[in-house]
Image (tube, rainbow, N blue to C red):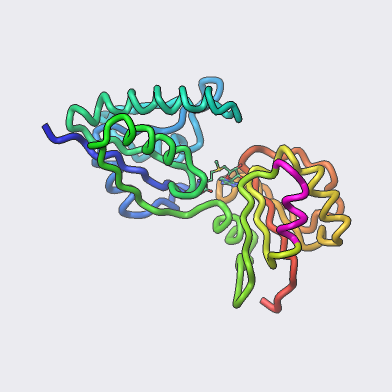
Amino acid sequence: MQTGILYGISVGPGDRELITLKGLRILKESTVVAFPAGIGGKPGFAQQIVGQWLGSNQIQLPLSFPYVNDSVALAQAWLKAAEQVWQYLSLGQDVAFACEGDVSFYSTFTYLSQTLQQLYPETVVQTVPGVCSPMAAASSLGIPLSVLDQRLAVLPALYHVKELEIVLDWADVVVLMKVSSVYKQVWQLLEQRQLLEHACVVERATRSEQVIYRDLSNQPSLKLPYFSVLIVKVTQSSN
Ligand SMILES: C[S@@+](CC[C@H](N)C(=O)[O-])C[C@H]1O[C@@H](n2cnc3c(N)ncnc32)[C@H](O)[C@@H]1O
């Protein structure tokens, strides 16, 4: 029997209209729709985005991925999720994995699909691109993310402030993902460099709960949610 296809569908940053037509079509056509399980029994972010598009005949498959840095615990979670997904693929049923933002941009989907292909090399994977959070945040702020020859740097997470110093010396525009846990240190460094005025934070970009902070000069101790990005314009363009 032919196995089903594992689709990685980018569902966008939050606004339900920011999924692509192709992503929506495949999502609706798939027998099984998987997504990262929410915390504390609540629906996860991707699940909230796609919930309204799913039919009662579709199987919903929440997969647990812990928010930890422990590589053993993570590998175990990917293995378990891969087996859960394979149950359906092996029966010839397609599984669409709903991924918040873009599926190729710091997404759990990559680990899930790699684990599946290691366990079952016959696994067929297809992805549908979409809107990732830095682009969504720039749109919410009403600014271009980069223009002309500007160098754009994206830091997926900051474990040492030294990394940010190096990047600030090089880039014209810097995007910090997962900034919530290091905001205080970042603020101090931006203050030293006199960049606070040119820094913005967008919480939950494009969602109804979106919050925007422009000019962080008076915001030394923001308590940010996990879904927050910070954008710093290191050099000022006329655009
Ligand atoms: C594991 S990464 C996932 C990135 C996602 N695949 C994307 O395309 O944006 C999680 C980080 O993305 C950022 N993020 C994702 N969605 C966001 C949103 N709607 N608003 C603000 N930040 C978001 C946050 O910095 C968060 O800590």
Q: Left or right: 113 with respect to 48?
A: left
Q: Is residue 181 above or below residue 77?
A: below
Tell me where residue 2 sits by quadrant.
Answer: top left
Name the residue rendered at 31%, 42% in the picture: 7
Q: Left or right: 24 with respect to 178?
A: left
Name the residue rendered at 18%, 34% in the picture: 3
Q: Is residue 122 above or below residue 215?
A: above
Magenta span includes 204: no
Q: Nearer the viewer, residue 81 or 21?
A: 81
What is the tally of numbered marks visible in this picture? 0
Q: Nearer the viewer, residue 26 or 84?
A: 84
Residue 150 x, y percent position in the rendering: 64, 72
Tell me where residue 237 sits by quadrant.
Answer: bottom right
Q: Left or right: 117 with respect to 210?
A: left
Image quarter for ligand 1: top right
Q: Report the quarter where the N terminus lies.
A: top left
Magenta span includes 164: yes
Q: Report the quarter where the C terminus lies.
A: bottom right
Name the residue rendered at 69%, 52% in the picture: 230
Residue 44 x, y percent position in the rendering: 49, 31
Q: Left or right: 165 with respect to 1?
A: right
